[in-house]
Amino acid sequence: MSDKPIRILCMSNQHKGDELIQQFIDEGCSVVLLIDEALRGETWPDGIDEIVYTPDLANYQDVINTVTWMSRGWAFDLIFPLDEFEVELVGMLREHMRLPGTGVSQVRRFRDKLTMRDVARDAGIAIPEYTRILNYDELRDWMGRVELPWMLKPRMEAGAMGIRKINDPEQLWRALDELGDVQSYYLLEEFLPGDVYHVDTLSIDGKSAFVSYQKYANPPIDIYQGGGVFSTQSVKRRTKDERELKKMNESIIRELGIENGVTHAEFIKAHADGKFYFLEVAARVGGAFVSDMIEKASGVNLWREWARLELAKLKGEKYELPEIAKKYSGLVLTLAHQEYPDTSAYDDVEIVWRAGKPYHAGLIVADDDYDRVDTLVQQYIERFMNDFNTSAPPMGTQRTG
């Protein structure tokens, strides 16, 4: 390696990833941040060399032109996406500029919900019934076989964004008429009532080096579209649920082919048959303070470890995980009607983190005792509904680029 500091370009349209940026700075790297104009005025970690603003990160060609222009003066060694929407764009830039990291072809499998379902189906991994939106004879055949309701899902959106629940065929045809030429960017899937789990993984050389298993109190789509309190907590260790999640998570990571990096996968345990089904996986750190909750249970900060892993690979060094703790943790979070919610009445000794974001109330609890964490989480969900909860319209931006 050269004596010059490693120069890293981080990109995002959301304010997140401070820990990853800080880790790069702590390691002596030069960090340049390319972010959406809407983030002007946000406070980022000290030590960033330059912050460059762009009108629209969704305009891939303009961003590629901007980054290659920036590269005339800055020789970038790595490019990192901080948010879901930049994952594919960064893959394109890596291939275009011949930089290390996952390229666009492989990244697409972690962005396109249709592609990941095809890969899972071909590998024999259980998934809900689904179909592409393309040929109408094929679509009608699927509609005749699969019971209502259905879920109309954007192939490229993050999480619950843009999902519509379809209760009758006429509603579907109206929705497709509204979508017009972009309807092929959607898929149709059977609705499976059940409990939703998420598995967050750090992979090294194709193997799961660190894995954390959690269960949402309510499906994220219910919270996203209907409001309420968002909550997730550790799965009890050495249980059947943990064993089945481990097997499915390892299978999907292997089949999708990630070698090094982080993944956030979601699975549903159907009420009808008690079986787990794969929903989706993203090549990123989980949002909504999930990474903070995982850190309070394990001592592992996925943002920082992702940075350490990529730097070790770039330098040809061996990466080693930090010591892993074995606590349980739970997160309770809600939009609040107060700008700065007062959570001082929540004074249990197990509280290890409080949200500091305006119009958000949030707590993380951690303890060696699973039952104690579970009890506190259930109590706080009910109290948050009374003390803080409010709602906002779901984000409706649709991206197809």
Image: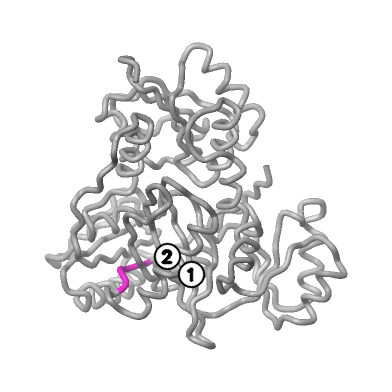
Q: Quadrant of the C terminus?
A: top right
Badge 1 crowding class, 10 Å Cα cut-off, few under 14, some 14 to 19, many 20 or more, is many
* 199 versus 241 height, above or below: above
Segment tinted magenta in the rendering? 231-235
Is residue 237 or residue 83 the one in the foreground? 237
Q: Mark 1 points at which residue?
A: 267
Circles 1 and 2, Cβ within 8 Å, touching? The answer is: yes
Q: Which of marks 1 and 2 is nearer the N terminus?
A: 2
Depth check: give the residue in front, 339 or 398: 398
Query: Residue placed at 47% from the left, 39% from the top?
Result: 81
Amino acid type shown at disc 1: Phe
**Residue positioned 50% across, 38% down in the render:** 13
How far across and how far down the image is residue 256, in percent? 54, 55
The percent coordinates of residue 225 (x first, y second) are 55, 65
* Quadrant into which the N terminus falls: top left
Dot 1: what SS? strand
Percent from the top left, x then y, of residue 321? 25, 48
Q: Residue 118, position in %: x, y?
A: 65, 62
Relative to 45, 148 lies left or right = right
Tell whether 312 sits left or right of 68.
left
- Residue at left offset 21%, top offset 56%: 324
Q: Name the residue under label 2.
A: 198
Q: Is residue 201 magenta?
A: no
Secondary structure character of the magenta stretch overall: strand
Query: Which picture quadrant has residue 97?
Result: top right
Residue in front for this viewpoint, 211 or 344: 211
Q: Which mark is residue 357?
A: none
* Image label count: 2
